[in-house]
Image: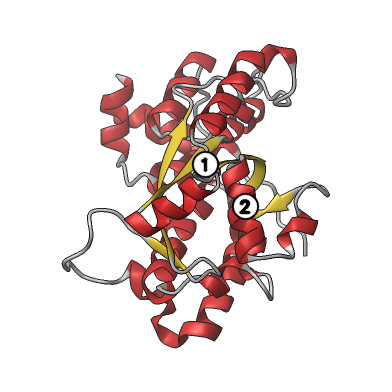
Amino acid sequence: MTQAPSTLQDTLRRARRGRRISQLELALELGVSQRHVSFVESGRSRPSRELLIGWLQVLEAPLALSNEALLAAGYAPAYSERHLEDPWLAEADHALEQLLRAHEPAPALVLDAEWNLVRMNGGARWLAATLMPAAADLLGQGPVNMLDLLTHPQGLSRHVSNLSDVGPRFLALLRREVAAHPSLLPRVEAYEADLLARLGTTAGAGSRAGPQAQAPVLTTRFRSPHGELAFFSMFTTFGSPHDITLASMRVEHLCAADAATEQAMRALQR
């Protein structure tokens, strides 16, 4: 059975509840009455285009969802969606390439909101091919999704030595992202099933664990022919993007978490 498309009212209510903001809190942020917020959410009142844009910004709605809401209200979209190779995005594209090169020889990759691999540097290619030789054939043959690489029969997660720590926490992150990007759900469910098969009932523990002593950053440890490689991640995003493509982009920088990993990366430069 085909699911009926969401109305503007459904979208606004879900976005507000997802942010855990009450109608009164939203009204105060927007400078309108709580009654007006209630009327808009119930379909009894139609917001102006300016109010609706501000409304969606307060709720931190993804730009693509904001465009859909504007169209549902009968207004023109507010945000463009161009290919990264479009001349209009040339400066942003150049910035991404600079970030990838600057992080060599350590791995860095550009991901979109659905974890599709958009770009990667030499360090990332080396790591992928080292941990998953089959990836050498996959990379460069079309779109590759990082979640698919993790759940592949010979996938990257098979080489994670601390999966019981990293896996549940990564799953908790993905579950939060599904709220903003529902199209992620099938891949997130596949990742959860893979974790359950390998870790049992502890697969979901990361999202339920109480306070405990933890390292300052979450480190992923990989078994490799070069010994254990340990990395933590940092992410770079565009500040206040007004294009859907740029809003979806993030650069993941993998940083060596110990001296042995740093030495292995430096050996790549020789």
- Residue pointed to by mark 2: 126
Q: Amino acid at mark 1?
A: Pro
Q: Earlier in the sequence, mark 2 or mark 1?
A: 1
Above or below 255: residue 61: above
Quadrant location, the N terminus: bottom right
Q: Which residue is mark 1?
A: 105
> Where is 178 relative to 269, above or below?
below
Q: Could you tell me how far apart the alpha carbons at marks 2 and 1 are, in whole angstroms?
A: 9 Å
Query: Residue 109 vs residue 255: left or right?
Result: right
Q: Position of residue 92 (x, y in %)?
A: 59, 19
Q: Is 143 left, or right, of 224 in this rendering?
A: right
Q: Position of residue 189 (x, y in %)?
A: 59, 69
Q: Any mark on residue 30, and which?
A: none
Label 1 near label 2: C-beta < 8 Å? yes
Tell me which amino acid carries mark 2. Trp
Residue at (43, 21) in percent of width and height: 54
| Residue at 43 percent of width and 78 percent of height | 203
Q: Circle 2: is it few (<14), some (14-19), or many (20+) Cα within 10 Å?
A: some
Helix, strand or loop at label 1? It is loop
Tell me the SS state at disc 2: helix
Dividing the picture into quadrants, the one containing residue 212 is bottom left
Residue nearer the viewer, 196 or 2: 196
Q: Position of residue 242 (x, y in %)?
A: 55, 19
Q: Quadrant of the C terminus?
A: top right
Q: Classify 179 as above or below 80.
A: below
Looking at the image, which residue is at 47% across and 69% down?
Answer: 227
Label 1: few (<14), some (14–19) or many (≥20) C-alpha neighbours in 10 Å:
many
